Image (cartoon, rainbow, N blue to C red):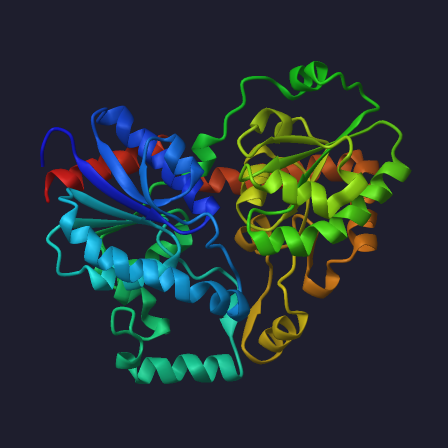
C-alpha cells in the first residue's frame, strides 16, 4: 500500500451512508491523504468520497419495494463488478445492506484486495421463523447451492459472509457468537453511533436558546428517510400533529430532514400542518436532546434518540398491510420492532407497528407520556442503560485503525 491508501466504500441506504461517512472521517484523521470513492449519498460526499453511484433512493422494505428497486440496483451491482478491478484499490469496505453487498462481494471475490464488512448483518434477538417461513429456511439449509449469494442458504448467511470478507465488524454484541462459530475474523468494537452522538450544550442551555420555558413542549417528529416511509408515515403524522396543536398551548415541533430533497416532499404531504415546524439536520443532536418527547419511526433515528435518553414513541408501517399480516401469520415473528425494545427484550418505549399505526393511538401515547414526568424519567434511565451496553470507548477510531491495517496488508 502507498502512503495514501485508495479505498472503495459502498453503502445502500441513507442510514448506512451516515455510518460510512463517520468511518471515512475517522480514517482520514489517521491517514489524511487517503482517497475514497464508492457508492453512497450526500453524507459520504460531504466526507470527501467521490460518488460513483448515488444510492440515496435505494432504501426499501418488503417484497414490493424490492421488486420496484431491484432491477436498477442489480444493474449497478453488475457495473461495479466490472469497474472495481480497474480502480487500483488498497481496500474495499461495504457497509450494511446485506443482499446487495453479499452479492457484490461474491462477484469480486477473485480480486486480491482486502475486504472489510462494516456493520456486518445480524439476526435480531426475538426474530424467529415459523410455519412456511421455517419450512423455507430448512429447504435452503438442505439445498445450500441454490442461493446465488456465496453459494449458501439464507440460514447460513454467517458462513457466506465469513468467506467473502477478510474482516467483519459488528455493532451489536449478540452477533459475535454466530460469526465466530462460522470461523469469521470478527470484532465487536461497540456501536459507533453511541460514540458519535455528542452535544455541546446542556438540555437547559439549548431550550433557553430556543426561547422555551418550563411550560413549553418541544417534540421531535422523525418520519424516516426512505421515500416510501415519508409517503406512508406523514399522512398519519399530519393528523397527530394537528391533535398535538389542539391539545398543547405552547407547542414547538421540529423535524430532521435526511436529504435536502425531502423538505419539499414533507411540506406537500403535511400541508398546513407543516407550518411552524422547524426543519433541522439529521445530526442536530442538541435539539434532539432538548426534546420533551419524540415520535420516531423504528431504525437509526430511534437509536440516536436512545443514545440521548429521549423519551420516544416509535412507529412503522410498510406499504402493504395485507403482506405484513401474511408474513406475521405464516412466515416470521419479531417480538419487538423498536431498537431499544429489541435489545432489552422488553417494552421500554411504546411502539405502534402496521395496523396499530393509527393517529389516535400515537396521539394518546404522546399526550400520556407528556403528562407523566415519572414515566419519562424512568424511560430515560432505561434507554441510557441500553445505550451503555453498546458503548465502548473509541469505537470509530478502532474501526478506522483496522481498516488501515487491512489496506496496508493488501
Number of numbered discs visible in the structure rendering: 0
- Judging depth in this view, the residue of 135 and 280 nearest the camera is 280
State whether residue 233 is above or below residue 285: below
Residue 209 in picture, x, y percent from top left: 69, 14
Instruction: Residue 189 in the image: state x and y as whole percent.
Output: 34, 41
Q: Residue at x 22, y 60 (%)?
A: 164
In this rendering, is residue 359 above or below 246? below
Picture quadrant where residue 205 is located: top right
For the N terminus, which image quadrant? top left
Depth check, front residue: 143 or 376: 143
Any part of residue 322 in sight: yes
Q: Quadrant of the C terminus?
A: top left
**Residue 351 spot, x, y in % from top left:** 68, 54
Residue 76 placement (x, y as % from top left): 33, 58
* 220 relative to 228, above or below: above
Residue 339, compared with residue 100, is above or below; it is above
Q: What residue sits 45% from the left and 50% below the top?
A: 13
Q: Residue at x 44, y 82 (%)?
A: 136
User: In percent of the image, x 37 and y 72: which residue is there?
Assistant: 155
In the image, taking residue 204 as reference, residue 227 lies left or right, namely left
Q: Is residue 178 visible?
A: no
Amino acid at each position: 500500500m502507498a502512503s495514501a491508501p485508495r479505498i472503495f466504500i459502498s453503502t445502500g441506504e441513507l442510514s448506512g451512508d451516515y455510518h460510512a461517512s463517520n468511518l471515512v472521517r475517522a480514517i482520514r484523521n489517521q491517514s489524511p491523504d487517503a482517497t475514497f470513492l464508492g457508492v453512497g449519498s450526500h453524507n459520504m460526499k460531504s466526507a470527501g468520497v467521490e460518488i460513483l453511484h448515488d444510492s440515496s433512493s435505494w432504501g426499501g422494505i418488503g417484497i414490493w419495494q424490492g421488486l420496484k428497486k431491484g432491477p436498477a440496483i442489480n444493474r449497478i451491482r453488475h457495473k461495479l463488478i466490472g469497474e472495481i478491478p480497474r480502480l487500483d484499490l488498497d481496500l474495499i469496505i461495504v457497509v450494511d445492506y446485506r443482499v446487495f453487498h453479499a452479492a457484490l462481494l461474491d462477484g469480486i471475490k477473485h480480486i486480491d484486495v482486502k475486504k472489510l464488512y462494516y456493520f456486518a448483518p445480524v439476526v435480531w434477538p426475538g426474530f424467529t421463523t415459523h410455519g412456511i417461513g421455517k419450512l423455507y429456511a430448512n429447504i435452503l439449509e438442505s439445498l445450500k447451492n441454490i442461493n446465488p449469494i456465496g453459494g449458501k442458504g439464507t440460514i447460513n448467511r454467517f458462513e457466506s459472509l465469513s468467506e467473502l470478507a477478510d474482516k467483519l465488524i459488528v455493532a451489536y454484541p449478540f452477533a459475535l457468537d454466530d460469526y465466530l462459530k462460522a470461523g469469521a475474523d470478527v470484532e465487536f468494537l461497540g456501536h459507533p453511533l453511541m460514540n458519535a452522538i455528542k452535544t455541546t450544550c446542556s438540555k437547559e442551555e439549548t431550550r433557553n436558546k430556543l426561547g422555551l420555558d418550563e411550560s413549553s413542549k418541544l417534540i421531535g417528529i422523525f418520519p424516516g428517510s426512505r421515500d416510501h416511509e415519508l409517503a406512508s408515515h406523514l399522512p398519519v403524522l399530519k393528523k397527530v400533529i394537528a391533535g398535538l396543536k389542539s391539545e398543547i398551548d405552547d407547542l414547538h415541533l421540529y423535524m430532521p430532514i435526511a436529504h435536502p430533497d425531502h423538505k419539499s416532499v414533507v411540506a406537500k404531504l403535511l400541508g398546513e400542518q407543516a407550518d411552524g415546524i422547524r426543519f433541522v439536520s439529521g445530526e442536530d443532536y442538541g435539539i434532539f436532546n432538548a426534546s420533551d418527547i419524540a415520535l420516531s419511526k423504528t431504525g437509526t433515528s430511534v437509536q440516536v434518540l436512545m443514545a440521548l435518553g429521549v423519551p420516544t414513541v416509535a412507529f412503522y408501517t410498510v406499504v402493504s398491510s395485507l403482506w405484513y399480516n401474511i408474513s406475521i401469520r405464516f412466515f416470521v415473528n419479531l417480538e419487538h420492532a423498536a431498537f431499544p425494545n429489541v435489545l432489552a427484550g422488553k417494552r421500554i418505549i411504546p411502539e405502534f407497528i402496521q395496523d396499530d399505526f393509527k393517529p389516535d393511538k400515537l396521539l394518546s401515547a404522546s399526550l400520556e407520556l407528556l403528562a407523566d414526568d415519572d414515566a419519562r424519567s424512568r424511560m430515560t434511565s432505561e434507554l441510557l442503560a441500553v445505550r451503555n451496553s453498546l458503548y465502548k470507548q473509541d469505537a470509530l477510531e478502532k474501526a478506522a485503525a483496522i481498516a488501515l491495517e487491512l489496506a496496508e496488508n493488501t
